[in-house]
Image: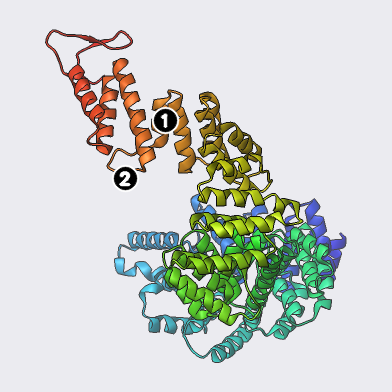
């Protein structure tokens, strides 16, 4: 009664609130839905009015005026989806659609992209008219009875008209007395204007003028469209001025978002809090919207309220996907150091057309974030997500050396770097030290040491900060490969001294001296280490001295030194173990190898060497166990694979060894050791298959063996023997293993 009294007194706000409250308790009150529809008509809220008339029409289908009001509102509200669904359901139930319903069905079908359905329905209407009148030429008269029918036909068949004919039709539609035809023709005209290729400022002025006139025709539908035009033109003050009086009467989610974001862009965040409170009071339907407005306020105030910002955006839960919402989500991801979300948010922002300064702000923030991560932890540059971010930020314009580094490093790591890519980047950034380093390394390992030297020397010409270990090592390796050994030795010695006897550099220096038989340098370094006060450096002296003695062919003295020399530095310990093993000091070598388990970074190598020592000691089972561990450490490594196959063969498991080696059944070049091991395995496997009367398998193995080794006498003899067994003999029946009898030569 209070609701009805407020309605009778034209207290519209009170009536709206009370009627909604009452109808939630009694959703079947037909007359009160009619009253509420009239309240919304007073506000101009055509969408809510439409929903009230629809409910009234379902409560009382015997009142066609309810249906007429519903369809009128649906068309004016441009809620084509609801109208199409309703009419399609009605049509599917074989309910008779009025001529006006049919026109609206066609319009709503096209407007909701159900074009094929519209074309089929249109064709059916023509056929029905033809059958009714018996005159094909008069079948389209139903569409020419009023402006709505002509517009419906135009939407279905207009694509067959020329652009001039389309423009002429829309011009007539914009002057129609039918408000729906006039508005829809106006909006289609505006779309054509957008794609006309004319001056943007002139187009905007025309759009603004046309839409301002159309607002008088349909405030509900046109106001959000004009607001969006203003928003795209960055006229945020115009959006605010247009939206505020509208939102006092009508709850439009789309317009409310445009208004709220305009308040942020226009530096009026004080309007956001009341807006959020208002929409939160409207119920759960609007809670995510209210949370977004709270988040906009937090964002506009800086990062002090980051916890609130993250909480509010979590409540939005992806329901809003505007440019500003994406930027806020990006900021939250940056603050929480979530690279996955940073990458996703940035990609979303950059995929959208540029708007305001959103893309620029996003790119700047993410680049700063990535820079700090890589500076604090260089390993982050190897993260695939960092590469993705770098690719997004650089785009087509390769103008940022930092981003270029990450991209080039990824190609270098994947062995996909080419000389052309390097040169393109060097042309753009000729002074970049990272590029020069990669280029020098690339040329060194691709057979161009002279070019490597050029890049290193260019770096030192450009660099005023002194030497670099990386470039020094590249320079020495290049000198070594070009045969300038004395110069390389001099630089090695200086590098070791300048780096306070760095242990890794010392080992590289040791290998260099061994490879080039630098006996004097080895002895001098042994003396220097012997005189050191640092215990672990002093402990390395015997290793250098032993190598010098070996080069002087004083093997016994060298091995005696190595038997007692001890160090925890894995590279030196492994070298000593290898020397002891190769000189049959197996127990001493084994104890060193076992001590290296868990210390040396390459477990595969340590396990493989232990296996070899155990085999030399005749302990085949132990050898097999460690060989298997070497293979399992990296099943793609050919050394581990070979050692494991070798130990399988040593333990009589020839078939398993042959399978592990995976030699293809075609002519290939094999290393001598692999070829010899595989041939031995094949010989023994063939012998066993012949002994087990598995002649077909033996024949295939013989063929495979002779493909790889055509002159193998064992293979030739075995193949003849197998084929003799397989050749059919008169009155002979061969019993196969398992007791089955079959004719020889037939495949089992």
In this view of the protein, which residue sits in the foreground, 468 or 245?
468
In this view of the protein, which residue sits in the foreground, 721 or 201?
721
**For mark 2, does the 10 Å Cα neighbourhood hold few (<14), some (14 to 19), or many (20 or more) residues?**
few
Q: In this view, does 43 lie to the left or right of 741?
A: right
Identify which residue is drawn at 70% across, 49% down.
Answer: 539
Count all numbered tags in the image, as a single digit: 2
Residue 657, numbered label: 1
SS class, disc 2: loop
Identify which residue is drawn at 16% across, 8% down.
Answer: 732
Residue at the spot of label 2 = 669
SS class, disc 1: helix
Identify which residue is drawn at 58% across, 55% down.
Answer: 510
Indicate whether 452 appears above or below 544. Answer: below
Distance from disc 2 to disc 1, alpha carbons, whole Å, reads 19 Å
Indicate whether 3 appears above or below 323. Answer: above
In this view of the protein, which residue sits in the foreground, 47 or 497?
497
Q: Is residue 392 left or right of residue 39?
A: left
Residue 15 appears in the rendering: yes
Q: Is residue 715 left or right of residue 641?
A: left
Residue 531: percent from left, percent from top: 72, 57
Residue 12: percent from left, percent from top: 81, 70
Residue 655: percent from left, percent from top: 39, 26
Indicate whether 116 appears above or below 204. Answer: above
Q: In which quarter of the image is the C terminus?
A: top left
Indicate whether 372 appears above or below 283. Answer: below
Residue 642: percent from left, percent from top: 44, 37
Q: Which of marks 2 and 1 is nearer the N terminus?
A: 1
Residue 49 appears in the rendering: no
In this view of the protein, which residue sits in the foreground, 519 or 77?
519
**For mark 1, does the 10 Å Cα neighbourhood hold few (<14), some (14 to 19), or many (20 or more) residues?**
many
């Amino acid at each position: 009664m209070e609701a009805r009294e407020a309605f009778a007194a034209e207290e519209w706000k009170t009536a709206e609130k009370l009627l909604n409250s009452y109808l939630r308790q009694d959703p079947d009150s037909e007359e009160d839905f009619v009253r509420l529809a009239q309240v919304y008509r007073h506000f101009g809220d055509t969408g809510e009015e439409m929903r009230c008339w629809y409910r009234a029409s379902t409560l009382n289908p015997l009142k066609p005026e309810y249906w007429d009001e519903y369809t009128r509102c649906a068309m004016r509200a441009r809620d084509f989806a609801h109208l199409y669904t309703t009419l399609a359901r009605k049509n599917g139930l074989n309910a008779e659609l009025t001529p006006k319903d049919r026109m609206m069905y066609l319009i709503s079908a096209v407007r909701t992209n159900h074009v094929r359905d519209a074309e089929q329905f249109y064709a059916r209407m023509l056929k029905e008219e033809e059958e009714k009148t018996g005159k094909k030429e008069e079948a389209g008269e139903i569409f020419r009875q009023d402006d709505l029918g002509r517009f419906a036909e135009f939407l279905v068949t207009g694509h067959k008209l020329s652009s001039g004919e389309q423009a002429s039709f829309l011009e007539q539609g914009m002057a129609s007395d039918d408000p729906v035809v006039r508005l829809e023709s106006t909006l289609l005209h505006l779309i054509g204007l957008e794609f006309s290729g004319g001056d943007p400022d002139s187009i905007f002025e025309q759009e603004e003028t046309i839409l301002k006139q159309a607002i008088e025709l349909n405030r509900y539908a046109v106001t959000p469209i004009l607001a969006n035009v203003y928003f795209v033109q960055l006229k945020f003050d115009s959006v605010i001025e247009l939206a505020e009086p509208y939102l006092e009467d009508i709850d439009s989610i789309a317009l409310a978002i445009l208004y709220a974001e305009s308040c942020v862009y226009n530096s009026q965040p004080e309007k956001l809090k009341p807006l959020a409170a208002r929409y939160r009071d409207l119920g759960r339907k609007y809670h995510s919207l209210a949370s977004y407005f709270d988040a906009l306020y937090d964002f506009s105030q800086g990062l002090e309220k980051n916890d609130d910002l993250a909480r509010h955006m979590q409540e939005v839960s992806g329901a809003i996907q505007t440019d500003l919402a994406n930027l806020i989500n990006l900021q939250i991801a940056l603050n929480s150091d979530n690279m996955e979300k940073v990458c996703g948010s940035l990609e979303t922002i950059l995929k959208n057309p540029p708007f305001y300064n959103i893309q620029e702000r996003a790119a700047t923030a993410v680049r700063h974030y990535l820079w700090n991560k890589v500076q604090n932890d260089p390993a982050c540059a190897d993260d695939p997500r960092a590469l993705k971010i770098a690719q997004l930020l650089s785009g087509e314009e390769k103008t940022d050396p930092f981003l270029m580094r990450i991209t080039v490093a990824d190609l270098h790591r994947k062995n996909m770097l080419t000389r052309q890519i390097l040169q393109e980047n060097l042309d753009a950034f000729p002074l970049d030290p990272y590029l020069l380093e990669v280029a020098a390394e690339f040329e060194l390992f691709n057979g161009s040491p002279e070019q490597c030297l050029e890049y290193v020397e260019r770096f030192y010409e450009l660099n005023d900060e002194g030497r670099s270990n990386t470039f020094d090592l590249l320079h020495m390796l290049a000198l070594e490969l070009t045969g300038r050994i004395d110069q390389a030795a001099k630089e090695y010695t200086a590098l070791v001294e300048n780096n306070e006897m760095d242990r890794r550099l010392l080992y590289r220096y040791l290998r260099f001296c061994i490879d080039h038989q630098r006996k004097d340098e080895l002895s001098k370094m042994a003396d220097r280490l012997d005189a050191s006060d640092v215990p672990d450096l002093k402990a390395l002296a015997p290793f250098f001295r032993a190598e010098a003695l070996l080069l002087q062919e004083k093997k016994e003295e060298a091995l005696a030194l190595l038997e007692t020399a001890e160090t925890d530095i894995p590279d030196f310990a492994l070298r000593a173990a290898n020397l002891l093993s190769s000189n049959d000091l197996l127990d001493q070598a084994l104890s060193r190898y076992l001590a290296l388990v868990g210390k040396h970074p390459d477990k595969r190598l340590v396990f493989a060497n232990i296996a070899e020592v155990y085999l030399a000691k005749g302990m085949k089972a132990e050898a097999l166990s460690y060989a298997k561990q070497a293979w399992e450490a990296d099943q793609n490594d050919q050394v581990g694979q070979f050692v494991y196959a070798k130990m399988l063969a040593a333990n009589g498991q020839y078939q398993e060894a042959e399978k592990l080696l995976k030699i293809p059944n075609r002519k290939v070049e094999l290393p001598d050791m692999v070829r010899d091991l595989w041939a031995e395995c094949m010989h023994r496997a063939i012998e066993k298959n012949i002994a087990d009367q598995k002649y077909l398998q033996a024949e295939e193995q013989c063929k495979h063996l002779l493909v790889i080794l055509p002159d193998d006498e064992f293979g030739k003899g075995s193949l003849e023997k197998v084929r003799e067994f397989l050749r059919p003999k008169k009155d002979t029946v061969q019993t196969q293993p398992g007791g089955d009898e079959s004719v020889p030569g037939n495949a089992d």
